[in-house]
Each structure stands twice: as structure tokens, then as C-alpha cells.
């Protein structure tokens, strides 16, 4: 599949384990942009939608999955006007 694992480079600390051999490839930048898009969705789900702590416990494990699915669908509905504007 020719896929290399992605590890973020530590640019604020004293040194990073990721050097120029990894960061020079165009796929590294693409991976960072895609990762940011995914993290934005999870950040919205946790903060705005209140899924940072679930209220379902014990035998209601399936309900947690349904609550997450419902919340992800709500996130897509929130993004829909912006996506429609881009495609027009």
C-alpha cells in the first residue's frame, strides 16, 4: 500500500524525533491538513455537542454509539451550508 505512518513534528520543543527526511515529502503536509480537519470534528463533538462525558453507563453501551452517531450527523448538518456554498 506504500503508506507511511504519520507522526506530528514537535516544532516548539528543544528537538523533534521527526527530521527533514520525513517532513520534506508532500504527503506529510497533506497528512497534517487532513488530520486538522478530523480533529476539528472531534473537537466540535466534544465541546459544542457535549460528548466529552457520556451520560450512558453500564448496559447502555449501545446507546453511547447511537449518541455519537447522532452527534456526528448533527455536525454534518451544521457544516452543510458551508459545503453547499463551496460547491456552487
Image (cartoon, rainbow, N blue to C red):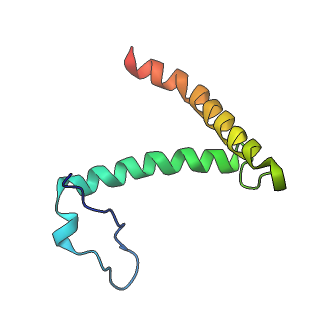
Q: Residue at x 77, y 52 (%)?
A: 54
Can you tell which quarter of the image residue 57 is in? bottom right
Placement of 26 over or under 5, stated as above or below? above
Q: Residue at x 37, y 47 (%)?
A: 34
Residue ranking furthest to the top: 88
Q: On the picture, is 58 further left or further right than 47?
A: right
Residue 76 picture location, percent across and down:
57, 30
Q: Residue at x 30, y 80 (%)?
A: 17
Residue 66 picture location, percent across and down:
70, 38
On the question of residue 57 being in view, the answer is: no
Q: Residue at x 28, y 49 (%)?
A: 30
Viewer-nearest residue: 19 or 58? 58
Q: On the picture, is 53 further left or further right than 74?
A: right
Can you tell which quarter of the image residue 2 is in? bottom left
Residue ranking furthest to the bottom: 14
Placement of 23 over or under 29, stated as above or below? below
Placement of 22 over or under 49, stated as above or below? below
Q: Quadrant of the C terminus?
A: top left
Amino acid at each position: 500500500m506504500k503508506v507511511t505512518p504519520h507522526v506530528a513534528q514537535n516544532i516548539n520543543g528543544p528537538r523533534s524525533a521527526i527530521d527533514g527526511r520525513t517532513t520534506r515529502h508532500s504527503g506529510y503536509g497533506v497528512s497534517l491538513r487532513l488530520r486538522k480537519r478530523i480533529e476539528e470534528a472531534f473537537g466540535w463533538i466534544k465541546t459544542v455537542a457535549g460528548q466529552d462525558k457520556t451520560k450512558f453507563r453500564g448496559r447502555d453501551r449501545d446507546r453511547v454509539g447511537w449518541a455519537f452517531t447522532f452527534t456526528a450527523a448533527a455536525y454534518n448538518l451544521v457544516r452543510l451550508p458551508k459545503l453547499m456554498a463551496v460547491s456552487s
